[in-house]
Image (cartoon, rainbow, N blue to C red):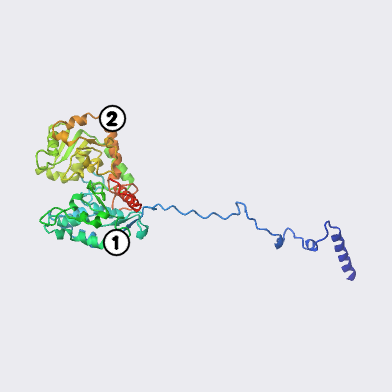
């Protein structure tokens, strides 16, 4: 055993002494094999691993499609909105049924699918009143994709107040305090809120579904039309959306009157556009309406000229024939069969009929710029000659201009181009179905909301409100 031990150490010594550079006993005795782990003092960490060794990158944060577009909507006491609809007969007390059929279905009214003698398709058509936009807008806002519960994160604050309904129930009341009670209640409720104090209401907006003149009563003594909702200083801080705006008020925005069509999808819109594009239009022009007091008005001359022309379809809304003008199918049939639709001023400068005509693919003919051009700048193109005709009312009332000759002089190619532009406008002048979460096109509601968001953003930068 001693001999074997001596031999072993002799061999080790001989091996080490023969290695170049001296001998490192540990490197020989403990030389790693291909199966052993590396020695710790010789292990290094690779600071630049190969692509295969790198961990996957962290996912990029998803783009916020609502950035800069969030709306905070007040959860208001029902007395300011939906409670007003419960006594729907009182909203139009001078008629037997009141407003009940019109406030149904989120303000769109009763459905008319299949009615109208083939004019209306099975879906998307409702008997909509012209003064229910505050209800319709609230319904659309409930399904707005960028609502937020945090007012500090909101681009604008929506006040769902049904001003048109409040006015309707008291419109003929002689007591001014009765007419203004809910408006004053609204002002008090808003101005006590922390959301209001953030910008003094300058980031707030609301919809009053009638013309501006219905909310600008100047006196409290005796009987005078309307309420004074828009005259309160607090309300003047907000943006008011109306179907007709005051040309002197920068806080007013005019938007289209509601029509009978409330589509859910872009496919619904496209189907209607195909229909009106293909419609036969035997009449050069048409007028649906009645006279106004006084023989010197533009309407009297329009009725006279239309009645004397074999190329004009006169749908007279007066006397025994007046009931026909309340039949949506009959009115739309007149417009759909005409190349041009005459749109003089109504009781005020604007008419709902303008948007019914556009919906029917009929080129509107105006007699005053204030009937559309200076009102609906958000929704109608500034190149007015591409989609409409203007015949100054003074030319007609002075018996200097023939409406028929003026319209007949427009070339067929120009008429086709104008009609196509009118048809292209349809989606942005209608309000989508208030009950639907499937809306996939930009409607009049979207255009208005985007305009309000832009206006509030300018106010935050202390820039003046732009003129409409």
Q: Residue 432, image x and y in percent?
A: 29, 49
Q: How many marks?
A: 2
Tell which of 155 and 6 is nearer to you: 155
Q: Secondary structure at mark 2?
A: helix
Q: Residue 52, image x and y in percent?
A: 60, 52
Q: Residues within 10 Å of mark 2 (few under 14, many from 20)?
A: few
Q: Is residue 45 visible?
A: yes
Query: Separation of disc 2 and disc 1 at Cα?
Result: 52 Å
Q: Secondary structure at mark 1?
A: loop
In the displayed structure, does residue 150 sit left or right of residue 177? right
When asked about the image quadrant of residue 303, the answer is top left
Q: Quadrant of the N terminus?
A: bottom right
Residue topped by disc 1:
75
Tell which of 318 and 444 is nearer to you: 444
In the displayed structure, does residue 92 sit left or right of residue 186? left
- Residue 33 vertical placement versus 292 (above, below): below
Q: Residue 74, image x and y in percent?
A: 30, 60
Q: In the orientation shown, which residue stands out farthest toward the bottom?
A: 1
Residues marked 2 and 1 touching at CB (< 8 Å):
no
Q: In the orientation shown, which residue stands out farthest toward the right?
A: 3
Tell which of 386 and 234 is nearer to you: 234
Q: Is residue 89 visible?
A: no
Ranked by sequence position, the earlier of labels 2 and 1 is 1
Please tell me which residue is depicted at 17% across the width and 45% down the height of the picture.
348
Q: Residue 210, image x and y in percent?
A: 20, 51
Tell which of 308 and 162 is nearer to you: 162
Mark 2 or mark 1, whichever is nearer to me = 1
Which dot marks residue 413? 2
When asked about the image quadrant of residue 143, the answer is bottom left
Q: Quadrant of the C terminus?
A: top left
- Residue 379 vertical placement versus 205 (above, below): above
- Residue 297 vertical placement versus 445 (above, below): above
């Amino acid at each position: 055993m001693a001999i074997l031990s001596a031999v072993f150490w002799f061999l080790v010594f001989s091996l080490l002494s023969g290695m170049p550079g001296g001998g490192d006993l540990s490197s020989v005795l403990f030389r790693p094999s291909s199966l052993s782990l590396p020695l710790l003092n010789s292990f290094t960490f690779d600071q630049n691993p190969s692509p295969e060794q790198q961990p996957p990158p962290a996912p990029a944060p998803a783009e916020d499609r609502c950035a800069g577009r969030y709306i905070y909507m007040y959860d208001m006491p029902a007395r300011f909105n939906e409670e007003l609809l419960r006594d729907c007969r009182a909203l139009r007390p001078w008629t037997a049924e009141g407003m009940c059929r019109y406030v149904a279905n989120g303000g769109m009214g009763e459905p008319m699918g299949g009615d109208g003698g083939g004019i209306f398709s099975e879906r998307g058509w409702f008997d909509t009143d012209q003064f229910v936009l505050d209800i319709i807008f609230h319904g659309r806002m409930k399904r707005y994709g960028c609502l937020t519960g945090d007012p500090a994160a909101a681009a604008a604050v929506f006040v769902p107040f049904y001003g048109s309904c409040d006015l309707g129930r008291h419109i003929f009341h002689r007591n001014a305090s009765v007419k203004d009670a809910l408006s004053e209640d609204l002002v008090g409720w808003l101005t006590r809120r922390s959301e209001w104090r953030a910008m003094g209401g300058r980031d707030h907006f609301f919809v009053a579904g009638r013309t501006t003149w219905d909310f600008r009563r100047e006196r409290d003594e005796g009987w005078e039309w309307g309420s004074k909702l828009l005259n309160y200083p607090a309300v003047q801080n907000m943006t008011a959306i109306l179907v007709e705006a005051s040309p002197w008020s920068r806080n007013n925005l005019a938007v289209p009157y509601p029509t009978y069509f409330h589509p859910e999808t872009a496919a619904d819109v496209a189907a209607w556009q195909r229909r009106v594009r293909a419609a036969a239009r035997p009449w050069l022009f048409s007028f649906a309406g009645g006279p106004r007091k006084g023989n010197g008005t533009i309407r009297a001359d329009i009725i006279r000229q239309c009645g004397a022309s074999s190329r004009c379809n006169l749908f007279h809304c007066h006397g025994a024939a007046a009931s026909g003008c309340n039949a949506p199918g009959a009115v739309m049939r007149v417009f759909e069969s005409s190349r041009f639709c005459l749109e003089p001023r109504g009781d005020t400068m604007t008419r709902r009929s303008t948007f019914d005509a556009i919906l029917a693919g009929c080129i509107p003919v105006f007699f005053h710029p204030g009937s559309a051009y200076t009102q609906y700048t958000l929704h109608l193109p500034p190149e007015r000659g591409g989609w409409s005709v203007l015949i100054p009312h003074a030319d007609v009332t002075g018996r200097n201009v023939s409406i028929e000759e003026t319209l007949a002089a427009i070339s067929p190619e120009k008429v086709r181009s104008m009609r196509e532009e009118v048809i292209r406008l349809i989606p942005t002048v209608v309000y989508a179905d208030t009950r639907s979460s499937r809306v996939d096109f930009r409607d009049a509601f979207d255009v208005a909301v985007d305009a309000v968001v832009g206006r509030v953003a300018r106010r935050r930068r202390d820039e003046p409100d732009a003129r409409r």
